[in-house]
Each structure stands twice: as C-alpha cells, then as structure tokens.
Image: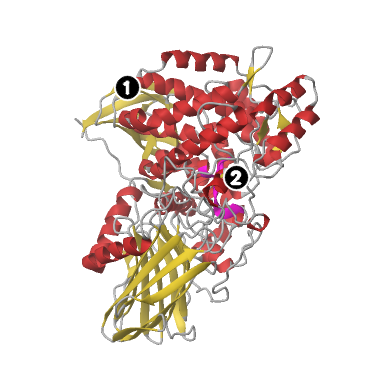
Amino acid sequence: MKKCYFIILFIFLSVSVSSSQTIDYTQGLSIWFDTPNGLDNRAIWLRASGLGNNPDKAWENSSLPIGNGSLGANILGSISAERITLNEKTLWKGGPNTAKGAGYYWNVNKQSANILKDIRQAFLDGDKEKAARLTQENFNGLAEYEERDETPFRFGSFTTMGELYIETGLSEINMKNYHRILSLDSAIAVVQFDKDGTEYQRKYFISYPDSVMVMKFTANKKGKQNLVLSYCPNSEAESYLSADGNNGLVYTGVLENNKMKFAFRIKALHKGGILKTENSRIIVKDADEVVFLLTADTDYKINFNPDFNDPQTYVGKDPEQTTLAMMNNALEKGYDELIRNHKTDYTALFNRVQLQINPEAGTPDLPTYKRLDNYRKGVPDYQLEQLYYQFGRYLLIASSRPGNMPANLQGLWHNNLDGPWRVDYHNNINIQMNYWPACSANLSECTWPLIDFIRSLVKPGEKTAQSYFNARGWTASISANIFGFTAPLSSKSMEWNLNPIAGPWLATHIWEYYDYTRDKKFLSEIGYELIKSSAQFTVDHLWHKPDGTYTAAPSTSPEHGPVDEGVTFAHAVVREILLDAIQASKVLGVDRKERRQWENILAKLVPYRIGRYGQLLEWSTDIDDPKDEHRHVNHLFGLHPGHTISPLTTPELAKAAKVVLEHRGDGGTGWSMGWKLNQWARLQDGNHAYKLYNNLLSNGTLDNLWDSHAPFQIDGNFGGTAGITEMLLQSHTGTIQLLPALPDAWTNGSISGICAKGNYEISILWKKGRLEKACILSKSGGPCTLRYKDSTLTLKTVKGRKYEIALDGNQLTLISTLII
C-alpha cells in the first residue's frame, strides 16, 4: 500500500555562530524580548482585586510563564537581580478550615425551593417585577465574594506563594545582546546577555515528571557567578525560613485565613567557587555555574466525598515531607537527567500538532512585542498567528496536567494576595473556554484536571440542587473554588449571580471528552454518572408550564439582562446535556426508561425563536436591542460550544445567529472576541472568523501574548487556539469537515495532529486556498463521513489505519490506506 503522509515544515532551534556555540532560542516557536525588566515592582502585595489595571505592569505584560500544572513561575529577567514570582495552584484562602469551622463554611445555600411556585405564578400573572424581586431575595446565597465583606472569608481566593530574588552583582551598564525568551518548542525560559566581554545565560523550566523547578546560571568564562538568593514570602502567612543543610533553604508557611500549610525547598548546586547559607540567603561566590532546584507543595487534597462536619476534609499530606521527597528525587537525578525528562515529557504532548500558515512569507527577526505592534498597524504576520495558536497549547500543558486542579482564570499564574475575581473557577464560560482546545488540539490528557474538578463538585452540588430547586442530581453556580463551593454568592445582582445551569454546562465536557477519545471504560466507570446526575438536575429544575412546554424559570442570560421565565442560553444548555445523556445511555445500553423521559422533555422544551430583527432571541420575549454590543453572546451557545445550531442542519437558526453576531460587533474583551471567533467559524465564514482573530491579537493581547480582559485573563488564549482549530476542522455535526472556515488570507498551509470526534487524528494540506490532501488516522474504527465544501465521502474505517484523501476535480477521493 502507498504510504500515507505529508511533510509539515517545521523550524527547529538553530545554533548561532558564536564562540560559545550557544543555542539561539529566539528561533523556532518562541516569545522573546530584547530589553530587560526593572525591579520597580519588587514585592508588591495588594489586597485589592485588581479588576482594572494591574499595577505590576512588568509582570502582567512582559514576564514569561512556565509551569507543570501545579507549580508555576514568572520570569522577569532583570539584570541586577532576577525576579521570579511563584505559585502553587492549590494555595487558596477560604474553605471549611477557616475560624468558624465546617458548619459555617457549608452553610451557604438558601432554602428557596418553596419560592419557585410563587415566582412561576408571578410569570403566569404577567408580573415580571414580582418574579424578579422574589428571585433576587431568595436565589442568591449566604457567602460574600469580597474578603472585606466577611470575616472569616470563606469563599477565599487563589494567592501568591511569594517571590524569589537572585542578585547577580551586575548592572545594565555596558550590557548588550539582551534576550529574554520563552521557547515553546522545549518549555524552557532563557535570559541571556553580554556584559563586559562575558556571555551570561540563565535557563528555567518546571518539570512535570519530576515535580521540580530548575534554574541554571552559566557564563562562557569561569568564576563569573556571584549570586545571592533571597525570598519574599506571602505577607498573609506565618512563615518560617531556615537553612536546609549547607546548600539550601526550606520555607514553611501557614495561611492566616484557613491554616493551610505550604512549603518550598531550594537547593543550590555549584561548580567552582564557594557556596554557603547565611541569614536566610544562599550566597555563591566566584562559581563557574550554579543550578538551583526548587520544590513546592501545599497540604491540600482534592476530595470527591467531603465530610461536611470535618474542617480538615481537604487537608492532606504534610508539604514539608512531600517537598523533601521531590527534592531528594531531583538531587539523585541531577540536571542532565532532569532536563532530558522534562523535554521528553513536554514534547510528547506539544509536538503532536504542527501548524504552518503561508510558510513562504517567512518570520520577521524581531522581538515578539515589536511584531505584535506591527501587526496592530496592519502588517501581516502569519507566523505570529501560528505562534499564538501554539502558545495556547503551551499554556494548557503548563497549567493543566493530570493529578492537579484545572486551569483557573489566570491558568496558575498570579502575583498578588488577591486578584481579579479571586482568580477563581468562573463557571459561566471562563473555565469551560479554558478547555475548548484540549481535545481538538490533541491534548485530551490535559482535560483530566477538569474532570476531577467536576467530580469534586457533585456532593456539594447535590445540596445546592436540593436547596434551590428540590432537584435530584447536582449543579454549580457562578463561581467555584478548590473546596467544593457550588452555591450562588450573596449578591442580589441576578444578571450575573443566578446561573443554575452552570453545572450542566460543565457536565457537557464529560461527554466531549468521551466523544473525542471513545474511552468506553471511562464513560462506564466515571463519565456516565456525572452526565446522568446532571441531566436529572436539569429535568427537575425545569418548569412544566400549564401549556405543556418546559422552560427554565427563573433564569438569566449570564451577566446580561433581566430575570426571565426562560432564556435561550439555559434552554441551549438543557438541549446539550440531555442529548449527551441520551447518547451516553445508548452507548452503554442502560436507563432506557429514563432516556425516554429525556427525549420527551426535549420534544416539549421551548424552541429556539427568531425575533423582529431576524435575530435569535436572547430572552423569552423580543426585547433585544440591535445596538447592544454586550460582550456575552450566551444565547448562541447552541452554535458554539453546543451543536444544536449549524448552517448544515438548521440553516434558518444559523442565519439568525449571524444577525446576533453582526449586532454585537467584532470588538469586546479578549475572551469575548475568542468566543465570537469560534462562532463565526461555526457559521463557516472564514473571513469574518479571521477578522475576529486579527482583533483578538491586535486589541486583546499583551506583549507576552497573554490574553487581556483587561486585566490578564487566560481564557481568551484558549478560545483563540480553539477557534483556529474550528476554522480548519469541525466534527460536531456528525461529519468531519475539512477547512470549513478557511480565510482567503491563508492561501497556503498545513496542519497535522488535530483531532475529530470519533477518535480520529487529522492532517490537512492546502494550496491556493484549496484542499490538496488530508490524512485520517482512525484510532477506534467505525464509519467516518468526510466533507469538503459540497463533496462528501464515507469510509468504513478500521482501528489503527490511516486513510489518505485528495480531490478528484471537486470530489473527495480515497487515494490510499496504510496499516500502522
């Protein structure tokens, strides 16, 4: 058989022609700067939420993030003293171990289910004002969202682990050839510069397999490392810093708010010169090179079955001991093995997908921030567009790995005591958007932290479901923490605080993971019960109206508009989770009786409706304003991320969705532009999707390519990456569409390794805006229907075989099959 493959051009790291033959990390997929940061914002600890501008602009705009899913750091790259912010993703204030104990923490749900009948009667009476008032008074919760409003603060917030400083004894005088680089190819951050005839280099990485942060300081001349390492702790913790042998420090801390224990250890290994610990510092003199190893942990443990009477139900192992075990492991392996393990682990994930856009255009030899500035001025930079795509995949690998919590509002990077929206898990789009690219961009393993997080919400979420809706199953509300928080918050602003459908939205990701991986064992043992119990809540929380229809009352369109008797967003999520539950029960051959109930409710659910402007209605009545450019487009959930609206299956509804997007405009916050990018891609309008992508990079992206809400909020990065995949491949309608939204600007290109539902891995090559070739690897077997423009091709695939497809005229044709 003819071999099925085609080559994706890939730029490997090149070696510069210098006396030391150092690697030029600015080549390949890299984000880099040519000027150092200063130290003006050293140890800024702010209690303020920072919803506007982050006062530490260097950190937000020009630091380089590295991480392994639990430990995160930002490299600032200053000359006189390297500044590194540190995070451990489970270092949270709040929870049941605050001063008033477990009973106080869990007493957050109001008992409001008995008010539902009054609210719904008010809707029947046409008294929307009364319905809204009753909802505001009864469907909020008891916990505050701001620390200043409640003592002790039980919801809590993600908080910093402090900052590390490594003084170098150098100044910027006579410094040249400065580069601060994040290599996406290797997940290594590098700082390098020349000073007084000496070439200095620092390398940083955080290893997932070995749970250690590694920092290596070298120069091309001997005896040039004169370093003093010190630490500035979180100011809201009782801290203890002491020597750990002759070459290290150990720090143990206890948060004042909830007594959470945390620790980090640092060891210094040197060649040449002398090293000592003195006055809580590590001092190195006249060394040839120095390697610092850092391990960090907290005493947090995830709990799928928390004891509501135990204040320590989320307390696990002693971090002083876990960090010691990590450190001993790292010391035994040494630098060479640690970096080899790190690269092997990371590249096995990252290198699965390669993207090239107009490769003939070349890559400007400019720092990333200058390229971004040119891009904002209208200068094409297709390699910047593909860099941004891969940066989203990098960030997901760095902030979401199995065994850890999911990526939060800032992934895992944070520089203050408190932060924007507590740097929490926002369930009304933000955490969901974080995981849109996971399966399609071939990082399904990175979904496991989200799956475990959802599992941790079930038991507390059952209490919330019972309290507000007398419903079976479980749900969650607007915001969550690492301690199983599922209740609405205390605010009476229902436009954002009423979101009972957040749990079902989260549960749709369970089916999504199965649909991409076809892991039936997972579905049977873990996934189905999460989907089923969410569907049960969905059924019970609906209002069966006198006219026989079902509607979500009360409900709101998140962060927008009034309390309503049935918003389109809520019904779209209902459709999605019930369809998922029906499919899952069929796959497993279970619950036929309940499946019929789900099917009956779907048939009687209030349908999508089109308004007077030709728009898809957002609320139950036609009150939409065509001049409203609100950032949320919740009522288009069925278009994306759902699958109940499509130009292929529901063309009239798709046309109405397009009207909504035209009304809302092409601007917005970073994540909003990311969402609209995906929606335009689903409408198969490649040029308009590309316009949103251009706007996202131009108006919603910081110099280090982090997404800006403002402030920094990581979901836009993930939304952008997901949107590019949607432009090149879609599989949500039961067919695999090749290049469904390819823009005119991307004349030539290729992508390999992206995934389609049904457990297929796809590679695509296009030339002159037209499909040239595609290769489909079937990982589970089964029938597969491919579509390109108006041509379709159905294959009976066999597990483990590749199928090469090309165009014969305008028709898709099977060229060859390869057994692998």
For residue 215, which numbered disc appears in the image? Answer: none
Q: Which one is earlier in the sequence, the residue at label 2 or at label 1?
A: 2
Residue 612: image x %, image y %? 75, 24
Is residue 650 on the magenta stretch? no
Q: Is residue 423 magenta?
A: yes
Viewer can see residue 745: no
Q: 547 or 671, which is in the foreground?
A: 547
Which stretch did the figure color magenta? 421-431
Q: What amino acid does circle 2 point to?
A: Met
Q: In the displayed structure, does residue 330 sit left or right of residue 118? A: left
**Numbered disc in front, either 2 or 1:** 2
For the N terminus, the image quarter is: top left
Question: Disc 1 marks which amino acid?
Answer: Leu
Residue 373 percent across, percent down from the top left = 58, 61
Taking depth in this image into account, of 83 and 21 the one nearest to the observer is 83
- Can residue 61 be spotted in the picture? yes
- The structure residue drawn at horizontal position 74% and vertical position 27%, both measured from the top left corner, is 613
Instruction: Identify the secondary structure beneath mark 2.
Output: helix
Query: Any mark on residue 795, and which?
Result: 1
Tell me the crowding category of disc 1: few under 14, some 14 to 19, or many 20 or more residues within 10 angstroms, Cα based: few
Is 333 on the left-hand or right-hand side of 481? left
**522 versus 104 height, above or below:** above
Q: Which residue is mark 2?
A: 673
Q: Position of residue 513 (x, y in %)?
A: 40, 34
The answer to whether mark 2 and mark 1 are in CB contact below 8 A is: no
Label 1's element? strand
Q: Residues within 10 Å of mark 2 (few under 14, many from 20)?
A: many
Residue 731: quadrant of the picture: top left
Of 491 and 628, the residue lying toward us: 491
Question: Is 34 drawn above or below residue 555 in the view shown?
Answer: below
Q: Please, which colouring scheme is shown?
A: secondary structure
**Residue sitting at 25 percent across and 25 percent down?**
798
